[in-house]
Amino acid sequence: GEDVEQSLFLSVREGDSSVINCTYTDSSSTYLYWYKQEPGAGLQLLTYIFSNMDMKQDQRLTVLLNKKDKHLSLRIADTQTGDSAIYFCAETSNTDKLIFGTGTRLQVFP
Amino acid sequence: NAGVTQTPKFQVLKTGQSMTLQCAQDMNHEYMSWYRQDPGMGLRLIHYSVGAGITDQGEVPNGYNVSRSTTEDFPLRLLSAAPSQTSVYFCASSTPSGNTIYFGEGSWLTVV
């Protein structure tokens, strides 16, 4: 079945760049997403990328997709303390089901 | 625009009690789904629906029922709550292409 994997923790210093990685197994993925969840809050869609793209940039966020290796990454430039949250990678294929990773907890320290 | 609305936001149940988590969307989306989020496990799909009158099971359907009598509403029912159902529940809706998926704010459920 489909599977999405992420590392559980990432710790970075304020002002540095953060890179959160994700791997997936479904070769028929059409869209890949990054969601942010702050403590006690719901999910916030950060960005998404269509599977025929290899990069998408939106202000401080850069998404890179290596479709051959089924690897997705989210780079946050100039990471701030407000970026501390759990980041979920997700993918959907033609079945319309959204499959999530376990989430990466990003901690930003001064 | 209300988007996806879930109620209640917080609920405490006793083991064996029943309850319904409500989910409504005003975007005329065909596809709706329910997920649960548990620590270290990410989001897991409980049930989903691709349109009114159609429902299907996800990864963890046991202990939950759903129905989709209208496009707007997709309630999730716990018939006999168990402590293992303590979790945060998210409802979502999207268009069939899946390029835009909207989530509710979550419902925090504790079963004691």
Image: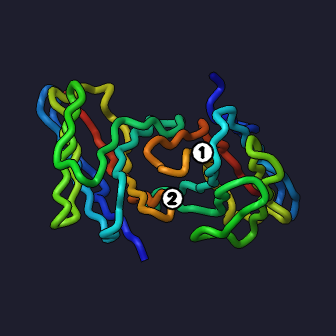
* The N terminus of chain B lies in quadrant: top right
Left of B109 or right of it: where is B88? left
Dividing the picture into quadrants, the one containing residue B58 is bottom right
Query: In what element is the residue under mark 2?
Result: loop
Do discs 2 and 1 belong to a common subunit? no
Q: Residue extending furthest right?
A: B17
What label sits on residue B93 in the rendered view?
Answer: 1
Side of B93 relative to A2 (left or right):
right
Indicate the quadrant containing the C terminus of chain B: top left, top right, bottom left or bottom right: bottom right
Whether B109 is drawn above or below B58: the answer is: above
In the image, residue B45 above or below residue B105: below
Task: Tell whether B18 sits left or right of A5.
Answer: right
Q: Amino acid at mark 2?
A: Asp
Residue A96 circle label:
2
- Front residue (pair B112, B24): B24
Q: Residues within 10 Å of mark 1 (few under 14, many from 20)?
A: many
Q: Residue at x 59, y 46 (%)?
A: B92
**Secondary structure type for disc 1:** strand
Numbered circle sitting on residue A88 = none
Going 36% across and 52% down the picture, which residue do you hit?
A: A31
Picture coordinates of residue B35 (x, y %)?
A: 59, 55
> Alpha carbon of mark 2 to alpha carbon of mark 1: how far?
11 Å
Determine the chain carrying the residue at label 1.
B
